[in-house]
DNA sequence: GCATGCGTACCGCTGAGCGGAACACCAAGA
DNA sequence: TCTTGGTGTTCCGCTCAGCGGTACGCATGC
């Protein structure tokens, strides 16, 4: 085997399993190594060194060195001295990735209206696995410091948009998410499968999902799904704000209306 | 040689040059092939088929098939039936790429203020080669249909932000851009090196760059560079609007002020 | 001095990647 | 109906791009 199996020796755990702990790449394909390298960059950090990347990916330092040189040659990475950062080309391609869906462009004006009308932060998100990915975030004028970030991820069950999407997704899909576990994000996060299912049933009935300090203390949110012709959710929008300043029930109709309009436009 | 050299036969040009015309990949490295595949997607198009991708990249259909399967496995591409589109993971990584620079986050509030004050579309862009890449675009309420797009490219010499950056860049850099040619974008695009140099000198003197229907007929724009401690431009911001509705001279101080403030904040 | 971290270079082995050939499929046109 | 030309996909033997251990130069900080 060509993979860096030797790395296990440093953390000598008696794992007989084929996959050592960490983010180590099992798949020896070059594509796997390259994506691992790109995915090694995390929200917080700036430029990373070869050694740090090797540590994160589980690849030999030598390999990281060579691969990164290739990626730099093609603009996917950039050199800053001897450190590496994600290249602008990735940003360009990434923008195309969402634009392809058409969702962002179509939703933009409506989201802007919604922010204007509510003076709060509005979100557009899709489901990816058990998490939501924020495609667009328009911050309100007096918005709280929300954990949501364009391109950022968040556990679906802990967000309004997540619950809105799940409520309009096939049953077995919800099972998968629940089966994967409901990690606690804030003090109020729903971690009980039964409670979640009860809430989702209500959401499916009303068309709007509420979230009260389940993702971060001090904030609440109302969400509603964007559905396709079959009634399945493809995305969701939400309005979020301070728990003591925002009356979620009052904003629900606005969010619901915008979501319905968007669903119709996309059809 | 392993590369798809055979492709030249179809367009049998007597090129003895090592690089056949088109976007064909000369570099036989896997990284090159993978990036070529990702870069094959263009702003307009939605999901692409294997054959189309093979045509665009110059790679054998078989290779595209295999490579794309790998990329799909790792989330960089997604399958839609048998067609392929850019994956959401690329969007996520792409967002990190700009966030790493800190520019976007720092500029956001100021750009929002600028839009609020001017009621026009504001831009944040950096220089990449001979073109500018838009990192952020905040559309004004009564904005014209500008060709600028987040993540989009545009020839530097034909935009306000481009001229602002060039005016505060090392001489030899400007030479390179001019040497690469000044393609005409609109009827009013500056294609004369001498005229461009004269304008850049004025921009360097005043700190603001103007653009009058040089990128698209009907629109004008005022721009000002974000400079580092050495006085070199790292980016630029601009306000753009209708040619007959916007008085660029009047907005110049606002743009200049915002740019200076941003430059100071980033230092 | 001597660790310990870094980024980088050398170089022989080898299997992942390669792509031609052939496949099944689905139109549109004869 | 049988082409013809376009898809996407599978097979399989050859081979060179990628691999990674080893080694080096250079900063750090005991």
Image (cartoon, coloured by chain):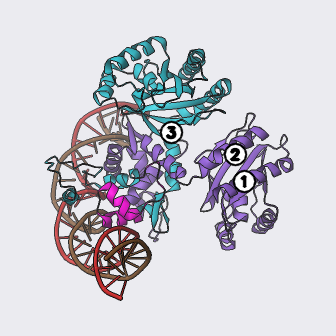
Chain colours: A purple, B cyan, C brown, D red
Q: Which image quadrant for residue A10?
A: bottom left
A59 is higher (above) or lower (below) than C13 = above
Circle 3 sits on which residue?
B98
In the rendered structure, find residue A261 and report the number of the disc placed on it.
1
Subunit of label 1 = A
What separation in Å lies between label 2 and label 3 (alpha carbons)? 25 Å
In the rendered structure, find residue A110 and report the number of the disc placed on it.
2
Q: Which residues are magenta?
A: B41-69
Q: Earlier in the sequence, mark 1 or mark 2?
A: 2
Subunit of label 3 = B
Subunit of label 2 = A
Residue B25 visible, this angle: yes
Residue B60 percent coordinates (x, y): 29, 63
Q: Are marks 2 and 3 on the same chain?
A: no
- Secondary structure at badge 1 equals helix
A237 is higher (above) or lower (below) than A25 = above
Which of label 1 and label 3 is nearer to you? 1
What residue appears at the point 65 percent right and 32 percent down from the top-left corner? B142
- Secondary structure at badge 3 equals helix
Pick the residue in front: B122 or B78: B122
Asked if labels 2 and 1 touch by Cβ distance under 8 angstroms, the answer is yes
Residue A200 percent coordinates (x, y): 77, 65
- Left or right? Give the position of B2 relative to A121: left
Quadrant placement of the N terminus of chain A: bottom left
Label 2 environment density (alpha carbons within 10 Å; few <14, some 14–19, many ≥20): some
What residue appears at the point 35 percent right and 25 percent down from the top-left corner? B191
């Amino acid at each position: 085997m060509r993979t860096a199996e030797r790395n296990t020796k440093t953390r000598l755990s008696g794992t007989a399993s084929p996959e050592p702990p960490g983010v180590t790449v099992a798949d020896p394909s070059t594509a796997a190594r390259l994506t691992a390298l790109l995915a090694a960059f995390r929200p917080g950090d700036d430029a990373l060194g070869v050694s740090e990347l090797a540590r994160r990916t589980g690849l030999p330092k030598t390999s990281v060195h060579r691969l990164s040189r290739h990626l730099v040659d093609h603009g996917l990475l950039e050199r800053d001295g001897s450190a590496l950062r994600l290249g602008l080309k990735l940003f360009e391609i990434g923008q195309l990735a969402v634009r392809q869906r058409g969702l962002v462009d179509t939703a933009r004006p409506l989201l802007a209206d919604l922010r204007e009308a509510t003076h709060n932060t509005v979100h557009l998100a899709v489901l990816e696995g058990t998490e939501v990915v924020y495609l667009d975030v328009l911050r309100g004028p007096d918005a709280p410091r929300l954990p949501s970030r364009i391109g950022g991820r968040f556990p679906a069950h802990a967000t309004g948009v997540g619950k809105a999407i799940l409520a309009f997704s096939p049953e077995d899909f919800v099972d998968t998410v629940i089966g994967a576990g409901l990690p606690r994000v804030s003090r109020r996060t729903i971690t009980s499968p039964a409670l979640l299912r009860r809430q989702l049933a209500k959401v499916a009935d009303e068309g709007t999902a509420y979230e009260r300090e389940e993702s971060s203390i001090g904030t609440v949110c109302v969400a509603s799904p964007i559905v396709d012709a079959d009634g399945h959710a493809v995305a969701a929008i939400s309005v979020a704000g301070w728990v003591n300043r925002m009356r979620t029930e009052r904003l629900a109709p606005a969010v619901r209306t915008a979501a319905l309009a968007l669903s119709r436009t996309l059809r």
